[in-house]
C-alpha cells in the first residue's frame, strides 16, 4: 500500500511517500528563514508559502519516485492541531488529489504522527508511554496501540519547545532557538542551582514551563552583559567567543538540565502509575535535544522499559511521519470523507480525536 503524506500544519511544507510502512521518498521546504525575520511564525505568510511551494514539492516527489498520482493507494494529511490557514492548504490539496484519482483520504492527528514517527526506524512496542515535546505541546500519553491513545498530562502554559524559543529570544538568539541553545549547552557543565525544575512539587502529570522562563528572564535582567548585541543565528553565534560565550553556554546548559530533569520527574511518575508499559517513546522537536535524549535513556533504563527515539530528522515537522501514521490508520480501517475539517490549535479536541479519525 502506497500512502502519500502531506504536512502543512505550521512552517514546514512537506510531502512524503510511505510504501508498506517504509519511507520511499520525501520533499521538505522549511519557512524558517522567512519567519525568523519576525521572531516567530506569521500565520498569513505561512499559508501563502504553503500554497506557493506545495504543488512543486508534490511534482518533485512524483519525479523522484517515478510514480504518477494514479499510483497512490491513499492520501494522509495532517488535519491538526496547527495554524488554520496552513492546515487548509494541505487539506484542499489532498482533497483535490483524492477527487482526481479516487484514492481514499485520511486525516492524521499531527501529534500522534510525531509519536508514531520512530516506527519508520524500527518496530514500535505497545503499550507505550509517549512523551510529546514539541513547539506547541508538551503531553504525556498512554499509547495502548498505534490508534488508541489516552492523554495523561499536559502543559498548563508554555510548551517545552516554546520555552526554548522564548529563552533564546531573551538572549537575542534567532528563532527557533532550541537547537542553538542545545549547541551552546554542549560547551559547559550545567549549574543545577541556577534555574528551578518548575511545577514538580505536586502529585500530577502536568507541566508548567512559564516559571522557568521567568527565572531565566530574571537572571538575564541581572546580567544584561550576556545578551547578544544583535540577533544571532548559526553564523552570528560562530563569532561569539571568550567569557561571554562561556557565560551563554552556562545558561544554556543549566536551562537544558532544568527542562530535562523536569520531564524526567513527570515521566517517572507516569511510568509508576501505568501498568504493563514496555516502552517509552519521546517525540517532537525537543526530542532532538541532547540532554532530553540522554536523560530519557536513563529513565527508560532504570524503569526497565525500551526507549524509542526518532532519528533527528524525524523529530521536527516532516511528512514521513504523516504518511506513516496514515498508513497505520488505513491498515486499521480508518477513512475520512472529503468533508474532513481542519482542527486548529486551541480548539477543543473531540473525544474521538484520540484515535485520529472516524472509522468508516
Ligand atoms: P507542534 O508539533 O506542537 O504543533 P511544532 O510542529 O512547531 O509544534 P516541532 O516541529 O515538533 O514543533 O518542534 C519545533 C520545536 O523544537 C521548536 O520549539 C524548536 O526550538 C525545538 N527544537 C528543535 N531542536 C531542538 C533541540 N536540539 N533542543 C531543544 N529544542 C529543539
Ligand atoms: Mg516547524
Ligand atoms: Fe510538530
Image (spheres, grey):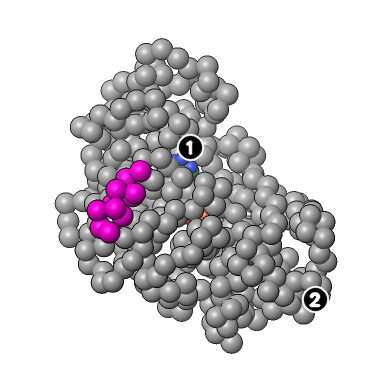
Q: Identify the residue at horizontal 58%, vertical 78% (top origin).
A: 331
Residue 115 falls inside the magenta stretch = no
Q: Is the N terminus in the top left, top right, bottom left or bottom right quadrant?
A: bottom right
Q: Is residue 354 left or right of residue 338?
A: left
Q: Secondary structure at mark 2?
A: helix
Which region is colored magenta? 294-304
Which quadrant of the figure contains the C terminus?
Answer: bottom right
**Above-or-below relation of 22 to 50:** below
Which of 279/16 is in front? 279
Which type of secondary structure does the marked residue at label 1 adopt? Answer: helix
Q: Is residue 301 magenta?
A: yes
Would you say the beta carbon of the disc 1 residue lies within 8 angstroms of ligand 1? yes
List the residue tagged with mark 2: 101
| Image: 237 above or below 43 | above
Q: In x, y percent, where is residue 206?
A: 28, 58
Give the left or right position of residue 206, taking residue 145 as reference: left
Residue at point 42%, 42% (across, down)? 289
Q: Residue at x 49, y 64 (%)?
A: 123
Q: Is residue 12 above or below residue 324?
A: above
* Label 1 CA crowd tier, 10 Å (few <14, some 14–19, many 20+): many
Relative depth, front residue between 56 and 2: 2
Pointer 1 or 2: first along the chain: 2
Give the image location of residue 300, x and y in percent: 31, 55
For the residues labelled 1 and 2, the Cα–Cα distance comes to 40 Å
* Residue 89, position as x, y percentages in the image: 68, 61
Are the residues flagged by discs 1 and 2 in contact, CB closer than 8 Å? no
Residue at 23% across, 39% down: 196
Q: Residue 321, located in which quarter of the rendered image?
A: bottom right
Above-or-below relation of 241 to 262: above
Please tell me which residue lies in front, 254 or 187: 187
**Mark 1 highlights which residue?**
179
Q: Position of residue 355 (x, y in %)?
A: 47, 76
Amino acid at each position: 500500500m502506497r500512502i502519500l503524506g502531506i504536512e502543512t500544519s505550521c512552517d514546514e511544507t512537506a510531502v512524503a511517500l510511505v510504501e508498506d510502512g517504509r519511507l520511499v521518498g520525501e520533499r521538505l521546504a522549511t519557512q524558517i528563514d522567512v519567519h525568523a525575520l519576525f521572531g516567530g511564525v506569521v500565520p498569513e505568510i505561512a499559508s501563502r508559502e504553503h500554497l506557493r511551494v506545495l504543488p512543486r514539492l508534490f511534482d518533485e516527489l512524483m519525479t523522484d519516485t517515478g510514480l504518477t498520482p494514479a499510483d497512490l493507494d491513499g492520501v494522509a494529511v495532517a488535519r491538526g492541531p496547527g495554524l488554520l490557514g496552513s492546515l487548509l492548504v494541505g487539506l484542499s490539496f489532498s482533497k483535490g488529489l483524492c477527487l482526481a484519482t479516487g484514492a481514499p483520504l485520511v486525516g492524521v492527528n499531527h501529534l500522534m504522527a510525531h509519536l508514531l514517527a520512530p516506527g519508520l526506524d524500527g518496530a514500535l512496542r505497545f503499550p507505550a508511554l509517549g512523551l510529546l515535546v514539541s513547539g506547541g505541546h508538551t503531553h504525556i500519553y498512554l499509547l495502548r496501540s498505534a490508534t488508541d491513545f489516552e492523554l495523561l498530562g499536559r502543559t498548563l502554559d508554555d510548551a517545552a519547545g516554546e520555552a526554548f524559543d522564548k529563552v533564546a529570544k531573551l538572549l537575542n538568539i534567532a528563532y527557533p532557538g532550541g537547537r542553538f541553545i542545545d549547541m551552546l549547552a554542549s560547551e559547559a557543565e550545567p549549574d543545577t542551582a541556577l534555574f528551578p525544575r518548575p511545577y514538580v512539587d505536586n502529585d500530577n502529570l502536568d507541566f508548567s514551563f512559564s516559571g522557568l522562563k521567568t527565572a531565566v528572564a530574571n537572571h538575564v535582567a541581572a546580567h544584561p552583559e550576556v545578551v547578544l548585541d544583535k540577533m544571532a543565528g548559526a553564523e552570528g553565534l560562530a563569532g561569539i567567543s571568550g567569557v561571554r560565550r562561556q557565560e551563554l553556554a552556562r545558561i544554556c546548559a543549566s536551562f537544558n538540565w532544568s527542562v530535562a530533569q523536569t520531564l524526567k520527574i513527570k515521566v517517572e511518575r507516569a511510568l509508576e502509575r501505568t501498568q504493563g508499559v514496555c516502552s517509552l517513546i519521546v517525540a517532537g522537536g525537543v526530542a532532538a535535544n541532547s540532554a532530553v535524549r540522554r536523560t530519557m535513556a536513563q529513565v527508560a533504563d532504570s524503569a526497565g522499559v525500551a526507549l524509542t527515539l526518532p532519528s533527528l530528522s524525524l523529530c521536527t515537522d516532516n511528512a514521513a511521519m504523516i504518511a506513516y501514521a496514515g498508513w497505520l490508520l488505513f491498515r486499521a480501517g480508518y477513512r475520512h470523507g472529503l468533508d474532513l475539517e481542519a482542527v486548529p490549535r486551541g480548539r477543543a479536541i473531540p473525544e474521538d480525536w484520540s484515535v485520529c479519525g472516524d472509522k468508516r
